[in-house]
Image (tube, rainbow, N blue to C red):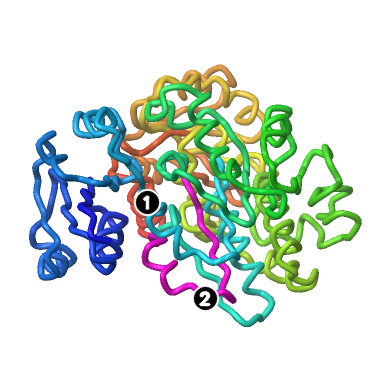
């Protein structure tokens, strides 16, 4: 390769990129102001001549051929602004790995549901034995650079791709692209909703007629977005807007004219999980998985940690951890999955969203509300408007005790914050884990 590469941000994706680039013979420098020199990965890479620095001044750009940045780092920091002015290519780790990806590439994106859909698809594809393996990577946790170089022609790679990653990928070309939905997320990063939508649609921009675009058809905007693709469109619809792909009809999940299974047999609750399952059915059928195997996989699918995860039954209450619900639509979808009274735990980073958008969903499902974080007062106003009890708590773990006090046997306690975690926690996983610990340690 013999190129000089600057990696900005040494998270797991940065480490994976450094390993891949070093193996290809590149001259690699990693820049991270919060660099931990005692990290074993740092020590190992240093031993292989990878350079490390905490500096992020413009002087670092001298002789740099390409920049690989952590997906979440904004393009507005000074060194990246200067790089763009100097026309130095800026990509993300997934783009480096793309050259190793074989033909069977399934890529999933969307504002909500992409992780659960990715896992559902993986379960469906694994349900029928084949020659190769089903590999899972991307925004879901494992960098693609750790997986793609080992991929064979018989393997299938299923990747979850965020809008941050898709922005830094010059030409993604999955054989099957999946778009679960598009709402108004991450506008602090993308600047405008149009930029955000364009980032999501990059997943299909480079596909051809020999590829497939599996897209949610339940909103007019999304149906119009489908017109932009050159790929073969495979729609999925929970609300009956198309029967050309996967859809819900009379309580059953179909693919074209074939019944796959009853919707109430899904292993996870919620109308949003019906949509996720429809996407998984479409991919399964496109990949040649038989109906019995698809149904078996979806019936046994138990959910993903922090995504409407069933924690268990405690004092006759069903407890769910939906810490990944970092926007209003995700919480609306979570609430729609229950037909018994819910005590909702919600609150977090205030991005300026109108929490009153939750009013209809809360009025239908929520009997009590416990609020915390920066959006606590806004959420409390929703509860007061509905006329339900509202309790202020310090944070999600502290909300557990009042949640049991407000709920009764047979009801649901649901953590679904409708906001990001960064006002109180480093990430949604920490928020969810501490909530689950508090639930398990609660003594009535």
Report the residue at 35% width, 45% height from top: 91
Report the residue at 23% width, 30% height from top: 77
Mark 2 = which residue? Answer: 152
Quadrant assignment, res 110: top right
The label nearer to you, 2 versus 1, is: 2
Relative to 395, 172 lies left or right: right
Quadrant assignment, res 401: top left
Disc 2 crowd rating (10 Å Cα; few below 14, some 14-19, many 20+) is some
Q: Which residues are magenta?
A: 142-162
Q: CA distance from mark 2 to mark 1?
A: 32 Å
Q: Residue 92, how many percent across, how many down? A: 36, 48
Judge whether residue 232 is colored magenta. Answer: no
Of helix, strand and loop, which one carries label 2?
loop
> Is the Cβ of the residue at disc 2 closer than 8 Å to that at disc 1?
no
Report the residue at 80% width, 50% height from top: 245
Question: Which quadrant, please, contains the N terminus?
Answer: bottom left
Relative to 104, 417 lies left or right: left
Mark 1 = which residue? Answer: 429
Q: Residue 413, how many percent across, how many down? A: 52, 46
Determine the residue located farthest toward the right in the rendered image: 257
Relative to 57, 142 lies left or right: right
| Viewer-closest of 115 and 169 | 169
Relative to 333, 345 lies left or right: left
Q: Is any atom of residue 404 visible in this view?
A: no
| Viewer-closest of 419 and 363 | 419
Of helix, strand and loop, which one carries label 1?
helix
Quadrant assignment, res 191: top left
Q: Which mark is residue 166?
A: none
């Amino acid at each position: 390769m013999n190129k000089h590469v600057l990696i900005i941000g040494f998270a797991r994706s940065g480490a994976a990129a450094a390993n891949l680039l070093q193996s290809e013979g590149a001259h690699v420098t990693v820049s991270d102001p919060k660099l931990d020199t005692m990290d074993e990965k740092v020590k190992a890479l240093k031993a292989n001549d990878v350079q490390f620095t905490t500096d992020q001044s413009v002087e670092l750009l001298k002789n740099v051929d390409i920049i690989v940045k952590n997906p979440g780092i904004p393009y507005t920091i000074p060194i990246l602004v200067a790089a763009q002015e100097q026309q130095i290519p800026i990509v993300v780790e997934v783009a480096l790995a793309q050259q190793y990806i074989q033909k069977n590439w399934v890529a999933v994106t969307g504002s909500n549901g992409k992780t659960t859909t990715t896992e559902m698809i993986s379960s469906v594809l694994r349900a029928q034995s084949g020659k190769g393996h089903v590999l899972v990577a991307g925004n879901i946790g494992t960098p693609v650079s750790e997986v793609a170089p080992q991929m064979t022609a018989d393997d299938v790679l299923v990747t979850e791709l965020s809008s941050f990653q898709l922005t830094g990928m010059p030409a993604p070309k999955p054989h099957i692209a999946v778009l679960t939905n598009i709402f108004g997320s991450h506008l602090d990063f993308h600047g405008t909703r149009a930029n955000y939508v364009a980032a999501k649609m990059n997943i299909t921009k480079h596909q051809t007629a020999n590829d497939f675009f599996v897209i949610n058809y339940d909103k007019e905007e999304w149906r119009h977005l489908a017109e932009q693709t050159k790929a073969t469109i495979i729609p999925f619809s929970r609300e009956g807007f198309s029967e050309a792909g996967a859809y819900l009809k009379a309580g059953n999940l179909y693919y074209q004219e074939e019944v796959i299974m009853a919707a109430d047999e899904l292993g996870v609750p919620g109308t949003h999980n019906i949509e996720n399952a429809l996407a998984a059915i479409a991919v399964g059928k496109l990949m040649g998985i038989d109906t019995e195997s698809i149904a078996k996989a979806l019936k046994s699918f138990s959910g993903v940690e922090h995504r409407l995860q069933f924690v268990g039954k405690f004092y006759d209450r069903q407890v769910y951890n939906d810490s990944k619900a970092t926007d209003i639509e995700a919480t609306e979808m979570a609430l729609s999955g229950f037909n018994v009274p819910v005590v909702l735990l919600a609150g977090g980073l205030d991005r300026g969203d109108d929490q009153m958008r939750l009013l209809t969903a809360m009025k239908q499902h929520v009997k009590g509300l416990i609020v915390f974080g920066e959006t606590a007062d806004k959420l409390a106003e929703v509860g007061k408007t509905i006329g339900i009890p509202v309790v202020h708590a310090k944070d999600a773990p502290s909300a557990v005790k009042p949640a049991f006090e407000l709920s009764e046997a047979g009801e649901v306690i649901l953590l679904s914050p409708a906001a990001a975690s960064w006002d109180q926690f480093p990430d949604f996983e920490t928020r969810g884990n501490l909530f689950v610990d508090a639930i398990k340690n609660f003594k009535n």
